[in-house]
Amino acid sequence: MQSTIKFTKSDLAKYPFLKEAAEYVKELDFKVEDLIDPQFNAVLKRAQERIEEATLYVLVSGNSRNEDVEILSFPTAIILAIATENSFIKKRYALAEAKKAFNDFKREPKEKLLAITQNFGWKITTVGNTAFAPYEFAINFADYLRNTTYLRDKKWKLVNRLLSEGNVFITRGETARLLSEEVRKYIEKRLEARDKLKFPVEITELAEKIRKLSIEKVGEAEIEGLPKKVVNEAFPPCIKSLYESVKAGRHLSHVGRFTLTSFLINIGMPTETVIDLFRNFSDFNERMTNYQVEHIAGERGSRTRYIPPKCETLQTHEVCINPDEICRTIRHPLSYYRRRLRIS
């Protein structure tokens, strides 16, 4: 079903990833070089705000009152994210824009949602038969499967859905959620710069400023990433103790469990392996453990991966034990791990 709705300029400011928004920017003949012109200061400032909020808080705040600034700041933010040359910042930005879109989508009438789905080539129709309430849309199963790949809740599994003639019935809220997945993937694809692009010095410097701020606020270990192979010998003393306790089935406090889980996830241990570790506990609950570990890993809910508490917090909760010489020079367990990897 094709929608007859025409997007307004306000719509383009709210949803700058739409094809119509890209066409609007193209008509303005907007180029990267234009960003160093003082008349685009507001655009550059708003783009910087988008990236910093996304990196630090996994959100993008409300629209600017100036619709042109809002529309142009989106492709500018894409440029800035690419210029940081940092995969964490890129993924965080794509996720934050998708979350913002989801919150906006939820408030749209179904006619507007239908129009937005056309941007992504969905085969979808509205459901007029009230017997199918609360479902308002029927989406082709191929489009449905493409956008539920990373959604872990069991309700998204095709076997748990109402399916008829190759179409999956979904609610308006579910439609908004699947559309937000399209937005995330679209932005991530745009951020995949195949070759090293050249930017004006001012843009490169601003991108470096954003990267340094991210390291300062989020942490170098999280921003810069860690080797994929888990090296147990590089564990800090507190993590070694927690790890051995879990293997022996000894009780851990809530803070201890969270610290160990988030640490192991962030150094590259698969969630399935982490879950298996907790099977040694007498009170092991598979459903609850799966949920908690996957939530910490960012595979559920907001898709935000959590990092372990700082050393100061671990000291407060008596999780920090037997600190060694390296412990006295760092402030975070992941920093210890990185340090040990470098000197080993």
Image (spheres, rainbow, N blue to C red):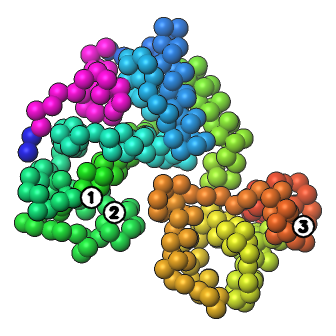
Disc 1 packing (10 Å; few <14; some 14–19; many ≥20):
few
Q: Is disc 2 placed on a helix, strand or loop?
A: loop
Q: Looking at the picture, how far across and down is residue 141, in whole percent?
A: 17, 62
Label 2 crowd bin: few (<14), some (14–19), many (20+), radius 10 Å: few
Q: Would residue 197 be seen by someone viewing this image from the given angle?
A: no
Relative to 260, say whether 97 is above or below: above
Label 3 sits on residue: 323
Query: Does the CB distance between marks 2 and 1 fall below 8 Å?
Result: yes
Residue 275 occupies quadrant: bottom right
Image quarter of residue 328:
bottom right
Q: Nearer the viewer, residue 75 or 231?
A: 75
Mark closest to the chain's N terminus, 3 or 2: 2
- Residue assigned mark 2: 149
Residue 247 shows up from this direction: yes
Q: Nearer the viewer, residue 101 or 328?
A: 101
Residue ID for mark 1: 146
What residue type is disc 2 on? Thr
Is there a contact, CB below 8 Å, between mark 3 and mark 1?
no
Q: Quadrant of residue 337?
A: bottom right
Mark 3 or 1, nearer chain start: 1
> Looking at the rendered structure, which numbered label has been put on residue 221?
none
Amino acid at the residue labelled 1: Arg
Residue 292 located within the stretch drawn in magenta? no
| Residue 15 on the magenta segment | yes
- State the residue at coordinates (24%, 23%): 8
